[in-house]
Image (cartoon, rainbow, N blue to C red):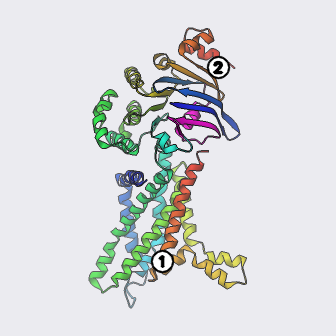
Amino acid sequence: MIHDVLICFYKDFKFYFASRIIYLLLLVYIMMAAAFTFLGTDFYIASSVNLQQFFKLQPLLFIIIVPALTMRSIADEYRSRTLEIIITQPIARLAFVLGKFLAAWSVCGILLLSSCIIWAILANLLPLDNFWILCCYLSAFLMSGALCAISLLAATFFYHALGAFAAGLGACFLLNNVNLGWIAGLFTSRSMLAAKIAGSFSFSHQYGEMISGQIGLAALLYFLSLIAAFVWLSGAVLDYKRR
Amino acid sequence: MLKVTNLCKKLGDREVINDISFNLSSHGITALLGPNGAGKTTLMRMLTGYYEIDNGTITIFGHDIVNQRCLASADISYVPENGGVYPEMMVVEYLKFMNDIKHISSANFYKNLPQILSKLELTEVADQKCEHLSKGFARRVAIAGALITHPKLLILDEPCEGLDVRQKVNLRAFLKECSRNCAILISTHIMEDVEALAERILLLMEGHLVCDATPYELKKKAHQFSIEDSFFTLTQR
């Protein structure tokens, strides 16, 4: 299984860097991240300087970047009819999907790593809480993983890259913005507790908690289980399409 | 080697494959014929495990394609019509990928590579990206990818499409040579290929297997002198 995952991962990861678009994406990501951090906020008049704003805006960047990354991963396999070849090989479908997911997630990791330049610049100028920043990077990486997984799931429904992009964008936007507390409140109008509990399961709430310095096992499990569920569902959708 | 029993498949409301049964021995070339929409591609996709089976069984060397898919598909190579290569990969890279995914050792790959490249006349394009190749070359790369792992069952959908006359003749000779050690199932509309290659013909019509015979028996059954005429006669509605 691991061997199959690695083969699929290596193939997709290499493809990302065979295209020039990835370098453009890298450039756009760094520029946007820097712009959001230094220009779009009260960075220069704030009494204490940190990267809170930078990490707060990461979901917004990844909501756009992740569907652009994953939109071709399944659509291209349909177009070149390689899906017929790969699905009929002695590999588990889950290994195929997992390889694709890991390749997209690794690219997100590289994008995040590239933004360390902002951290390095600030660290040279001011004293920073480096451990907290490291935790925030871990949070952002997990958040990007969950977005990759749901975007890949959306992509499995489409034969064309554009459709996959639109669906991925919609799915990532919904995942990030749906307030489960508000939805629960609609059904249980008298129970504030139920709404509060449901709200704590919201994606944005979990990410917000993590970047405010509360990385716990629950948050880790939350993101990892989201990833596992969406990757498994992607495999199930591919399986269903065989009918 | 391949045993197909009472195979059925519905796509939407249409019965595409209807109660088909046949066996294939471990060598020789079998042609799958039939008019458009007869169910040839669907049948091939079911044999490779790409499509789910509604009813019936497919076993390859005793391994069931549904319950033991990984074991069964280890012995099969499949080349779909119009495609099957990764455009961004170089030819050798693609062949290596196909080798690795079948869990075959690199030593074997590098031993087989020069022979496959030379037999399919791909040596000169070995370092080129598949997206830069002509249709004929891309087709041969796909076939090379299927053959590099020495499958026991090779399934080819329209193998000679896009090839020039010389390439067709060479490919036929190569397939003949390969068929000594593996079973080959080809689907084609080119009757020349059938005349030149097939030792057995399976004729499909609206999802039914209407004839399973040698070329000689087929011609005799249709009272014709050529496979093309026999095909016309037997597929008349």
Q: Counting other residues with Cα less than 10 Å from the Cα at mark 1, is it few (<14), some (14-19), or many (20 or more)?
A: few
Mark 2 or mark 1: which is in front?
A: 1
Q: Amino acid type of disc 2? A: Thr
Give residue B27's position: percent from left, percent from top: 45, 25
**Is residue B45 covered in magenta?**
yes
Circle 1 chain: A
- Residue lying at 48% horizontally and 71% vertically, measured from the top left: A59
Q: Residue at x 70, y 84 (%)?
A: A191
Check disc 1 and report its element: helix, strand or loop: helix
Q: Residue furthest front?
A: B62
- Please, which chain is the residue tagged with disc 2 on? B
Q: Position of residue B12 (x, y in %)?
A: 68, 41
Q: Which dot marks residue B206? A: none
Q: Position of residue B105 (x, y in %)?
A: 33, 43
Q: Residue at x 46, y 77 (%)?
A: A56
In front here: B132 or B196?
A: B196
- What percent of the width, then of the height, locates residue A182? 65, 77
Instruction: Give the residue number, with chain letter if any, for mark 1.
Output: A217
Asked if marks 2 and 1 fall on the same chain, the answer is no
Q: Which residue is mark 2?
A: B235
Query: Quick one: label 2, few (<14), some, or many (20+) residues within 10 Å?
Result: some
Toward the viewer: B235 or A89? A89
The residue segment tinted magenta is B35-64
For this view, does B89 lie left or right of residue A152?
left
Count of numbered labels shown in the rendering: 2
Q: CA–CA distance between discs 2 and 1? A: 67 Å
- The C terminus of chain B is located in which quarter? top right
The kind of secondary structure element at disc 2 is loop
Give amino acid for label 1. Answer: Leu
Judged left or right of residue A132, residue B55 is right
Residue A199: quarter of image: bottom right
Is residue A157 at least partly visible in the picture?
no
